[in-house]
Image: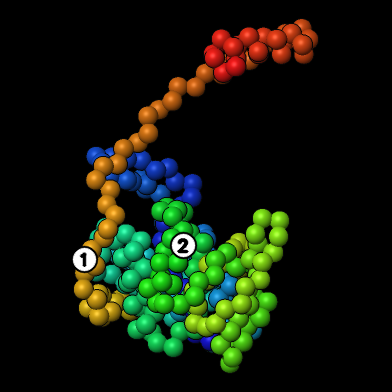
Amino acid sequence: MKIVVPVKVVPDTAATLKVEDGRVTWGDAPLVLNPWDEFAVEAALQTVEQHGGTVTVISMGDESALEAIRKALAMGAKEAVRIYDDALAGADVRVTAQVLAAAVRKMGDVDMVFFGRQAVDGDTGLTPMYTARALGWPFVGLVSAFTEMDPAGRTFAAERSVGEAKQTIQAPMPAVVTIAKEFAEPRYPSFMGIRKASRAKVPVWSLADLGLDAPAAKVRWPEITMPPKREVKVEFIEGATPREIAEKLVDKLIEAKVL
């Protein structure tokens, strides 16, 4: 099987978002592989371990994207491609999906594309389904397990968690899926994997390499501001008995016109 995993570099989840001069900044927070993408890489690695094949990761972005790519390579992915073009500055979800779909077509004979459920910075969760539509492939979201995988027959069955229930979906290959965290805990990269990934040469594809003109983004952010600060006061209500405390609380709520 040939599985492609798009990955994204994001600020560490402990980072604090700020707006400075109308621009979003994460300060000097370290960049990491999007945590949700780690589950997709793990699922792809487990799938090829069971059925044979290769895992290729792709990422859009400048050289900072190498942080995400090398983490995926250290985990066990065999190949990687970085996509970068000045014309992609300000790309929205639709543009990103078109570019990723073109990269998948260029690779040729791809059986499946595994995504994480969303990115922790943009947080839309829309890129996987947009990419599926651009490719014209079926889409299955939040896969927690593959109950069947038949590369020769070009079909698979996936289990999804739907609230308290389980849902099984059958679909043909090629297909795009997103992987839920219930699939498996991502593995830790080995020391040798880290060393090998650090030396890996990652090819860079431009829009011309993908046979694309500069796509125009449909979504723009003309203005970005921080939400107004809220002043919060905490008052501890004391009383001799629970009844007295409750009565005081009710009086406070009535005074504040909550009740």
Mark pair 1, 2: CA separation: 24 Å
- Res 164 visible: yes
| Residue with the mark numbered 2 | 33
- Count residues near mark 2 (Cα–Cα under 10 Å), then give few for <14, some for 14-19, many for 20+: many
- Which residue occupies the foreground of this view, 9 or 125? 125
Looking at the image, residue 142 lies above or below residue 151: above
At 37% from the left and 73% from the top, the residue drawn is 134
In the image, which is nearer the foreground, mark 1 or mark 2? Answer: 1
Q: Position of residue 76 (x, y in %)?
A: 53, 77
User: Disc 1, disc 2: CB below 8 Å?
Assistant: no
Looking at the image, residue 12 lies above or below residue 241: below
Callout 1 secondary element: helix
| Residue with the mark numbered 1 | 87
At 45% from the left and 77% from the top, the residue drawn is 137
Residue most extreme to the bottom: 152
The first of marks 1 and 2 along the sequence is 2
Callout 2 secondary element: strand
- Count residues near mark 1 (Cα–Cα under 10 Å), then give few for <14, some for 14-19, many for 20+: few
Looking at the picture, the colour scheme in use is rainbow
Q: Position of residue 222 (x, y in %)?
A: 24, 45
- Which residue occupies the foreground of this view, 10 or 75? 10
Looking at the image, residue 95 lies above or below residue 199: above
**Residue 169 sits in quarter:** bottom right
Q: Amino acid at mark 2?
A: Leu
- Which residue occupies the foreground of this view, 217 or 180? 217
Q: Position of residue 59 (x, y in %)?
A: 38, 69
- Which residue occupies the foreground of this view, 66 or 90? 90
- Res 145 visible: no
Q: Amino acid at mark 1?
A: Ala
Quadrant the C terminus occupies: top right
Looking at the image, residue 259 lies above or below residue 212: above
